[in-house]
Image: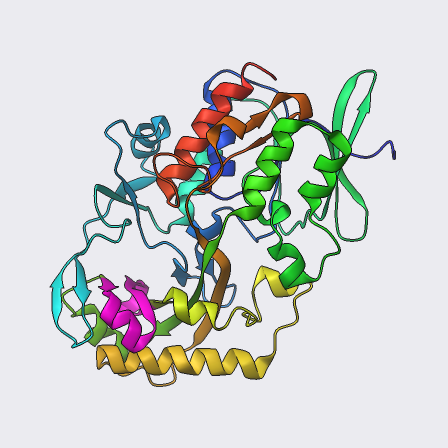
Amino acid sequence: MPSSLPRTDLAIVGAGVSGCALAASLRRRGWRGSIELLEIGRGPGGRAATRYSRQDPDLRINHGAPLFNIRAQTPPELLQALEQREVISPFRGSIQSLDGQRSLGPAIDDGFSDGQLWQGRGGMDALAAGLLELAEAEGGVLSRRFGTLVRHLRPERSKTGLRWTLENSSGEALVEARWLVLSGTLLAHPRCQQVFGWDGIPLEQAAESLADPQLNAAQSQLASIEGQASCNLLLTLPPEQASAWLALPWQVLQCTPSAQERWGLRRISIQPLAGGRCAVVAESSPAFAAAHLHVYGSRSSAAQLLGAKPDPSDEKRVLDALTQALTDLSGQTLGDAPRQLMRWGAAFPLAPGLDPGHGCCPESAIGFCGDSLAGDGFGRIEGALLSAEDLATELMKQL
């Protein structure tokens, strides 16, 4: 093992909401061990991230979640701290629904638009970034590595205990950790083989070597979770086109089942930008996304770090189809507005999810958090926050 290899008490793979919330929850509970946070994307947030541009400093597009909701009577502990630091604010925009006959109606129960509604200040990525700020404010070493793909998980038992070595796709060691937490399912799910051509499932291979019944159960459940995909069209409209969109009576438009069947769209959000511009994000229906699982955006992490090779002609066909659907549904002009494609292969996990009883496996020094854990908030940002807080409570007994 190279002497220069970083060593840490806890490695967290994934800087989405749950990974960042775990760091904050541990620090607020008084744990000051070292944390190494590894993320494939360019910054924190995951599906609650914000797209920026080096060429356009005023551009920011919430390309996944335009808002998040809290439905539980007892909200996540971190919510109050985030609000006090003005990291998040209540969502005040209008939410309406549209049916297959283009008739507007009140908001429908889609699971994401009831309860307390919140948004990140200045962008949804403020939620994850704010959680990391909470963690750092409490003290302790927190190292962040973005644009970093973890490809292999190598556990090794010794006289001093179990250690995890994380490696990239070239087999180069990234970090050695006393404890490991996976805040997403990619390294545990067969889709890593189906989409990226990997020769094995990293967590499954690790579990085989450890022979821990609890970890075997967790790996099996994670590998069996089905997920709905999502293809999102991102548009940036100049002031002359944005004015008509900004005048619409809604900021978030939900598509009813009949509208989804007609246009292949699930939700549309209008996001004001500086200078009278706006961004429009059109999220595809699950059926549309499932029919285009092989299509990636050329600027996606999958293309840049996971080895996926986007086909420009396929990408254009998907963008054209979504653009045409949005034009037809809205009756608004889009012209030659700059557009991008953002795609998640498993944007929304489907029940039952991972049994919380397998969320922490002490014998194998590994834990799991995220919206794929069963319980309150399953499949939503609320679940990501709550699962991180629950795991932090368990880890405080082990770390």
Image coordinates of residue 175 in percent, x first then y, are 74, 36
Q: Residue 205 in the image: x percent, y percent?
A: 74, 42
Give the x, y percent position of residue 168.
75, 48
Magenta span contains residue 26: no
User: Which quadrant holds the N terminus?
Assistant: top right
Whether 359 is drawn above or below 102: the answer is above
State whether residue 49 appears in this view: no
Q: As drawn, is 55 to the left or to the right of 156?
A: left
**Which corner quadrant of the image does residue 152 belong to?**
top right
Q: Is residue 130 above or below residue 343?
A: above
Q: Where is the C terminus found, in terms of image quarters?
A: top right
Q: Is residue 41 left or right of residue 229?
A: right
222 horizontally vs 339: left or right: right
> Residue 266: horizontal and vertical position, in percent?
31, 65
> Residue at left 53%, top 68%?
293
Q: Which residues are magenta?
A: 253-280
| Residue 268 higher or lower than 114, as above or below | below
Task: Name the one closer to the observer, 30 or 324.
Answer: 324
Task: Give the camera-side residue of 344 and 21.
Answer: 344
